[in-house]
């Protein structure tokens, strides 16, 4: 196997995600501020986790996530799922091309439905592709707390090509 190609085998996919996430985090310090961690999932997808922090509260006295943080987390996950989906399709291309394609993913539209207050110690956002085309992906996202209470859902359209 050539060294400039990074196939995504089960045991290597976490490294590709980590590398892409580190690249994205350097460009977006807000992700570090939120404490976002990216993880591969059992179904060959991606999820993010982040802890509750005082600086993420809309009202510190109530310890509830600010609505913009909820929306941001859902958007972050949608972009990560879109990037991961693109990478799976071009896993035999040079790493530079993979990273360039990951960096080209853009949110075109995002709808967030807030279902209950963002209370919890830790939050997990998951998602999956609803519609796949060469240029656009439609992705559904869900945010839950550590008790698996559904906090918010989102539907996003992401430019990938």
Image (cartoon, rainbow, N blue to C red):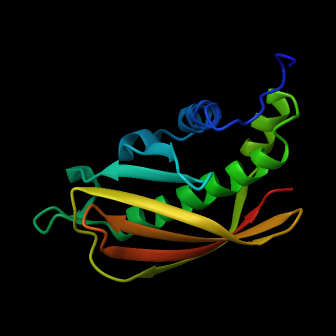
Name the residue: 56% across, 65% down: 127
Instruction: Please count the marks in the image.
Output: 0
As drawn, is 138 to the left or to the right of 61?
right
Q: Is residue 151 above or below residue 69?
A: below
**Which residue is at the far left?**
61
Q: Position of residue 148 (x, y in %)?
A: 31, 69
Instruction: From this view, report whether residue 130 is shown above or below residue 40.
Output: below
Up-down: is 102 above or below 58? above
Q: Residue at x 82, y 16 (%)?
A: 3
Seen from the viewer's position, the closer of residues 53 and 44 is 44
Q: Quadrant of the C terminus?
A: bottom right
Name the foreground residue: 12 vs 135. 12
Residue 98 position within the rendered picture, expressed as x and y whole percent measured from the top left:
80, 37
Which quadrant of the figure has residue 97? top right
Task: Indicate left or right for 41 with 84 as reference.
Answer: left
Relative to 16, is 154 above or below?
Answer: below
Q: Give me the residue at 33% from left, 58% from top.
A: 123
Left or right: residue 109 versus residue 26 is: right
User: Residue 158's spot in the image, x, y percent?
Assistant: 72, 64
Q: Quadrant of the N terminus?
A: top right
Residue furthest out toward the top: 3
Quadrant position of residue 2: top right
Picture coordinates of residue 38 (x, y %)? 49, 44
């Amino acid at each position: 196997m050539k060294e400039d190609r990074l196939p995504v085998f089960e045991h290597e996919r976490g490294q590709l995600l980590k590398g892409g996430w580190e690249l994205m985090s350097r460009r977006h310090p807000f992700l570090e501020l939120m404490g976002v961690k990216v993880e591969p999932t059992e179904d060959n997808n991606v999820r993010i986790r982040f802890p509750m922090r005082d600086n993420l509260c809309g009202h510190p006295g109530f310890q509830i996530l600010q609505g913009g943080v909820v929306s941001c987390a859902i958007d972050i996950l949608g972009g990560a799922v879109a990037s991961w989906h693109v990478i799976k399709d071009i896993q035999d291309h040079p790493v530079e091309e993979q990273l360039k394609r990951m960096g080209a993913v853009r949110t075109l539209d995002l709808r967030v439905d807030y279902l209950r207050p963002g209370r919890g110690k830790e939050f997990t956002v998951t998602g999956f592709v609803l519609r796949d085309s060469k240029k656009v992906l439609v992705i559904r996202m869900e945010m839950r707390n550590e008790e698996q209470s559904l906090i918010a859902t989102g539907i996003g359209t992401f430019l990938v090509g």
